[in-house]
Amino acid sequence: MHTRSLAGLCAALTALFVLTACTAAPGDDRPGASAAATAAPPASPGPRAVQEPLPQDQNLLAWTGDPNDAGHVTAQTTGGVGGRVTLVRLVLHEEITWSNIWLGLAGIDPQARLADCYLGVYDASGTLRAATADISPQLMTDPIAKPLPLAKPFTAAPGTYFIALLLNGTWATNALTLKATGAGISVNAGLTPPNLRYSTILTGQTSLPAKVDLAQQSTSTINTGWGSQWYAVS
């Protein structure tokens, strides 16, 4: 009787050993190997998603668009934009210290007579937050993207702002030109005042007013081709 019991125990142990060997990973005799072998393998990371260029990639804080796409130029007559405030909307998603406005200057007119030309920043209430000194000399040299310093940097909280350009003087229409996209008349698709992306406001200005009524934004000049100028912030 004792011999038969011992034989039965040996047979049971042999069967258990065979079952364990079938479920364990080949060559792995560690405790718990069978459970590890049946677990799902860790997911491998996929390829890094292709990202659009960011302003920070070029040591900038914000921009109206990738300057690589700013191949078009915009030009207007003195009568078309002289004394008008041109507004370009820019939405900030984080707080920055705003020190410079970068202007994409595409061409110059050596014979131009410029005076009382400014860049500035309005907030969503139409309040002037900062402005440059007269930029007329910088519009006469070096047709490149150039930073134009604000007279006093300011802290810009996240929100909507409008870069303002004021030109005065005389120049040849197709000589003094700014870098822009080719969007043209479609730049304001889906928008109405006071949230137009590109617009003009007021006439006969020789300086940027301290306050503007953004509800008075107009597209009449923008729709003649004076639209989608490229700007950046640093």
Image (tube, rainbow, N blue to C red):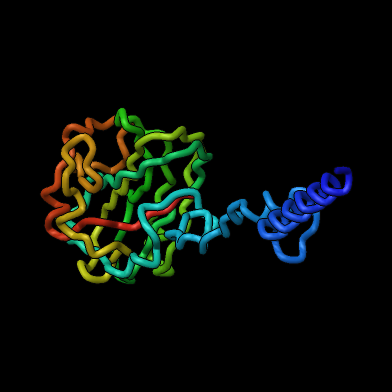
In the picture as drawn, the residue positioned furthest to the front comes out as: 1
Name the residue: 83% across, 44% down: 5
Counting from the top left corner in percent of width and height, residue 108 is at 33, 69
Name the residue: 37% across, 47% down: 119
Q: Is residue 4 left or right of residue 176?
A: right
Q: Is residue 18 left or right of residue 132?
A: right
Name the residue: 39% across, 57% down: 103
Quadrant of the rendered image containing residue 120:
top left
Counting from the top left corner in percent of width and height, residue 177 is at 28, 66
Counting from the top left corner in percent of width and height, residue 215 is at 18, 32
Counting from the top left corner in percent of width and height, residue 171 is at 24, 64
Name the residue: 45% across, 62% down: 50
Quadrant of the rendered image containing residue 224:
bottom left
Number of numbered discs present?
A: 0
For the N terminus, which image quadrant? Answer: top right
In the picture as drawn, the residue positioned furthest to the right comes out as: 2
Q: Is residue 107 left or right of residue 2?
A: left
Nearer to me, 125 or 172:
125
Nearer to me, 135 or 212:
212
Nearer to me, 103 or 132:
103
Q: Is residue 73 left or right of residue 130?
A: left
Nearer to me, 152 or 215:
215
